[in-house]
């Protein structure tokens, strides 16, 4: 599914922790019953849709440090 199919442009937002460079950012859209996730550099590209529970679990893992996304 593409990002425009998931949510209108105005629904997408970046985290307040996201830097201004925009090199490695994702944007999310709160869809009430789901959460849309897209690459901020490809606004018309593919998007993921996950449940709010799955998104919250992912955020908890990142905050706890259990999720390590280091590119080595």
Image (spheres, rainbow, N blue to C red):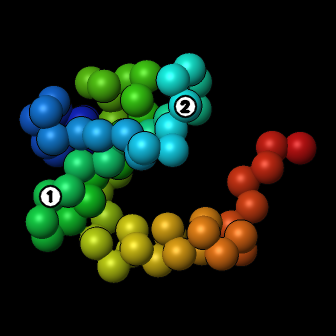
Q: Is residue 28 left or right of residue 8?
A: right
Residue 5 picture quarter: top left
Residue 6 picture quarter: top left
Q: Quadrant of the C terminus?
A: top right
Element class at badge 2: loop
Q: Is residue 12 left or right of residue 23?
A: left
Where 60 falls versus 72 (above or below)? Answer: below
What number is the disc on residue 72?
none
Choose mark 1 or mark 2, whichever is in front.
2
Q: Which residue is mark 1?
A: 31
Task: Please give the count of numbered marks on the rendered protein.
Answer: 2
Where 30 falls versus 61 (above or below)? Answer: above
Q: Earlier in the sequence, mark 1 or mark 2?
A: 2
Give the crowd class for mark 1: few <14, some 14-19, many >=20 residues within 10 Å.
Answer: some
Q: Outermost residue toward the right? A: 72
Q: Is residue 27 left or right of residue 35?
A: right
CA distance separating discs 1 and 2: 24 Å
Q: Which residue is mark 2?
A: 19
Could you say where residue 56 lies in the image, as x and y percent from the top left?
40, 74
Residue 51 in sight in this render:
yes
Residue 40 picture quarter: top left
- What residue is rendered at 50% in x and 70% in y? 58
- What residue is rendered at 75% in x and 61% in y? 68
Residue 47 in sight in this render:
no
């Amino acid at each position: 599914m593409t990002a425009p199919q998931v949510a209108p442009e105005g629904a997408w937002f970046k985290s307040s922790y996201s830097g201004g460079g925009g090199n490695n950012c994702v944007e999310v859209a709160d869809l009430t019953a789901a959460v849309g996730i897209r690459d901020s550099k490809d606004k018309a590209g593919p998007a993921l849709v996950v449940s709010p529970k799955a998104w919250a679990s992912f955020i908890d893992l990142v905050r706890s440090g259990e999720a390590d996304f280091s590119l080595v």
